[in-house]
Structures are given as structure tokens and as C-alpha cells.
Image (spheres, rainbow, N blue to C red):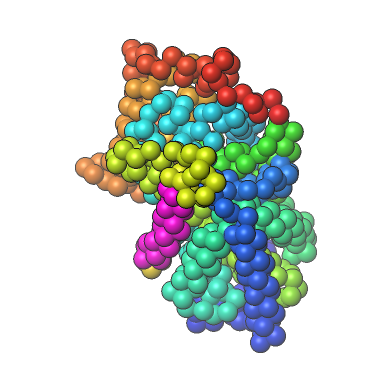
Amino acid sequence: MMPSYSLPLQGAGGIDLSGGLVIFAAFLFAAYVAVLVYLGYDGWKSTDTLRDFILGSKKLNGFIVGLSFGATYASANMFMGVPGMAYTHGTPALWWSTIGFGMPFIAIVLFAKRFWLMSRLGVGDMTLPEWIAERYQSPYLRAGAGVLSLFLVFYIVGQAVGAATMFGTLFGIPYTVGLAAALAIVAFYVTIGGMHTTILTDFFQSVLMMIFAAVTFVSLWMVFDNGIFSVVQGLAEVGKATTFNSTTSNFIFDSPFGVLVMTWFLTAFILMPHLMNRVLVLDNRTELKRFCFGAGISLFTMSVFMIWAGLAGRVMFPNLENADAVVPMYLMEALPPVLAVSIIVGILSAILTTADSLLHAMTSIIQQDLYKDTWLKRVRGLNVDADTEEEDRQRTGAKDKYDRRATRVGQVSAVGISVAAFVIGLDRPDSLFMLTQIGIAGFLSGTTIPIILGYFWRGSTKRGAEVGFTVGMLTYIVLFFGLGVTFSQSNQFLAFAVASITSLVSMGGVSLVTEDSVEEQQAIAFGRRNADTPTAHADD
């Protein structure tokens, strides 16, 4: 039999740390915030235009961008939600960990090069909704994808909930106060720094997160005689070491069909706007290769290692009330207190890292796609791209004016989104893992099929994409939110799978019977150059 373990908890849900450790943790976190402020200031100095805010104003090494991709991918879900899920479901959760590395990396290899090349050829180079709109010459898809991105507020709530949990763990701070503090910090440095700040902070966090994940995994051999083998043995003794778990309420762990749905979901996940916009920052093909290499390293380290803390915690602490708190509990038992606290602070900062990327992606879409292109250009009929030489010289031209307005709209929206996330997060969710997937599946329900077919199928048309987007989006909303249908109301994965199928069938069918009215659309989308296609950087 494996030994049992227990740790005293404070009333606020935190680990009972000595005064010295609390001071040490506060010092580390203050140092982290100081770094964020500095990077935010540096980003603010170099952010002069709307494009600078969205894509950054400085060239960045592809490997750095790739590592930042991994940090953004990992999030509170990977460092708290997935281990919490493993605590609840046992070894079937390893399906998520294994597929969570393999399928996103394969998707990067498949999608990143074409996505980057098509952006260099003029098919959208600032946001994911812009890419979709330019690919199909459809303002409707741009506005629709922009509106659908509002689903991502649930993902931001998940990060804030994870951060609030860590604040309570370290400092005994009440949940509501921790929730407000996390959102305030993220809104501040995203508002002033833009993409440049976001990538640098993500890179900084990625290095720390990979080290912490590796240390956590190695610590299993410090706690258990035979490391992961002893953990599996302990799980077997409590009935949690199985291939599938048919008793779970989450169907993705109960059968091969569930794993298949999970595989599709994690493949589509790579198309999230806060991830794919990293590709648009890259300057040439060499940096693109470096990006793929860096992303692969960080994906593997963060996906494979941290889940074992949740599995080990199930053996050590079988009666936790909050499964999402298993990682700090495990670390305080397995490691020297100073090292454990350092890693917990690192996880807190990692959570904030993903939240900033999500918030930056949402504000970029709001200011570029919803405000500037849809509201000003399409609804009000303003020429937002106008810019004469005199106006440019005086820096008071129409284009600069509208860009400044859009930037302010994005900054205000960052505050508004943070307030909305705070209100939603006041009702603390039972599972951080399940909460974050609501926003992911919601956004991907309409966009996944048009994006993927737009990559690979020359027969996909504007009307087909518009119908596929609409059908997929409505299917998810009806199924998940229970508008007359209840079979998937508690499981966003199944709702997303059905939405993908209906989107695929409808888009494929309409595309087969329609033709595009823009003759050069396919040439641009598939890189077949002509005299009118912008190709200045395509071979860089």
C-alpha cells in the first residue's frame, strides 16, 4: 500500500506557510510584476501604430516566438486544470496529455507554413478573422468570427480563476480579491504594451515553466521509490489506473470514440487566435523553422510532465475538496519549501501569461475587425485606409486618426473584457478544465472548418464558407446551451464535434454548387502568383 499524506490548510484555502515563506513568495511575485511593468513600458515606447500593437514593432527570433507559443498554449489549464482532471479521472487523463502534445505539434507543421505564406501574399496579415475574410473575400466572415471571439472571455475567466486559486494558496487572499488582482495586472500591461510585450513576457515565462515542469516530474522519484511506476500502482489500488473510465461524467475519457473527439478538438485548438497570431509575427522562412522547433520543445515539456503531479496527488491526498488545488499541495509535500514556493509563484505568473495573450488577441480582433473594418468601413462607409503624403507628413491623416481611435477602442475593450471576466468568475466553477473549454469550443465551432478547408481545398467557396460558419456556430449554441436539446448540454466536446460535422457537410455541399465571384481569390490563397499579387516577401 502507498502511504497516505495530508497537509494543513488555511481557512482561505491556502497552504499553511511560515511567515518567512510568505515574505519570500511575495518578494518573488513582486519581482515578476516589476519585470512585467518594465516590458510593458518597453513595448509602449515601441508601439506607434495599430499594426505595432497587434503584431509588434520589432523583429523577433523565431525560436523565442516558438517558446512563447508553448507558454500561451499551456495556461492555467495545463498547470492546474489538467492535473485536477487527472486527480479526478486517473490514468485515462493521460490521453489528454499525450494527444495534447502530438496533435498540436502536427497541426503546427501542417498549418503554420501555409498560414504564414498566405499572409505574406496578402491574405490577411493581422488577425485570424482578417485572414478568413481575405481568404473568402467575405466581410460577413470577418464580423462573424470577430463576434464569435467573444466566447474567449470564458477562457480568460479560467485563467483568472486559476490565478485567484494560487493567490489563496500562497497568501491566503480571499478568492474575490485574487480574481480582481489577476485581471487588473493583465489588463494593465496588455493595454500599454501590445504584442511586443506579450511575446517577451511569454518567452520569459516559457523558460521558467519548462524548468518547473521538468523539476516536478523528476520529483516523483523523490517521493515514490519507483517514480511513475509507483504512482500507477497506487492508482490501481484505488481503481484509477484504467485505459478508459466509463463511470466518469466526461465522455472523452470513457471510450475510443471520446478519445477521437478529443483528438479532433486538440487539433483544431491550434487555430485559436491567440496562438496562430504568433505565426504572423515571423519575418522569413528561417524564423518559421525556428518557431516550429521552439514550439515543439515547449509543447512537449508542458503537456507531458505536469499531469503527473495530479496523478501523484490522487495517491497522496485522496480526499481533496478542490481537485484544481492538487499541484500546490503536491509541490509542498514533494519539494523543499523554498523550491516549492518558487514553482507555485512561477505557475501563478504562467497563468497570467496566457491570460495576457488571450486578452491581447480579443482586443486586437475588436479594434481591427469589429471596430475599424466592420463598424467604420462597412457600416459607416468611411475610407479608413486613406492617407495622403501631406497627411502622413503631419501625422494627422485619416488613416492615422482611425488607427488611433481603434487603438483606444482596443484599450477600453481590454478593461471591459476584464470586468466581464470578473463578474462571470464570481461564481467559482467546479472544474477549471471544463470552464476553459467552453470558450475554446465556442470560437472553433464556426471557424475551424472554413479555415482548414480554406487551407487545403481549392473548391471551397465564399458562400460555402459563410454557410459552414453559420451552421457550425448555431449547432454549438443550440447543443451546448440547451436551446431545446439537452444531450450535450453538459459536454462542450460533444457539442463541438457535432458542430464540426454539420459545418463540414454544409460547407462542402454549398461549395460544390457555387462559384466565387472574385477570380484572383484562389490564386492568392494557394500561392499561384500573378502580376497583381503582392509577393515582395514571399520568398524571404
Residue at position x 42%, y 48% from top? 402
Q: Residue furthest bottom?
A: 19
User: Residue 326 location, x and y as percent?
Assistant: 58, 65
| Residue 412 among magenta residues | yes
Q: Residue furthest left?
A: 484
Q: Nearer the viewer, residue 181 or 416?
A: 416
Residue 168 visible from this viewpoint = yes
Secondary structure mostly seen in the magenta stretch: helix
Residue at position x 68%, y 78% from top? 27
Indicate the quadrant containing the C terminus: top left, top right, bottom left or bottom right.
top right
Q: Nearer the viewer, residue 522 or 265?
A: 522
| Residue 252 among magenta residues | no
Asked which quadrant contains residue 34, the reply is bottom right
User: Residue 68 location, x and y as percent?
Assistant: 65, 50
Q: Residue furthest front?
A: 390
Write the start and end of the magenta stretch as one range: 401-425
Residue at position x 62%, y 59% from top? 45
Q: Nearer the viewer, residue 529 or 292?
A: 529
User: Residue 201 location, x and y as percent?
Assistant: 65, 58
Q: Nearer the viewer, residue 117 or 300?
A: 117
Picture layout, residue 63 above or below residue 469: below
Indicate the quadrant containing the N terminus: top left, top right, bottom left or bottom right.
bottom right
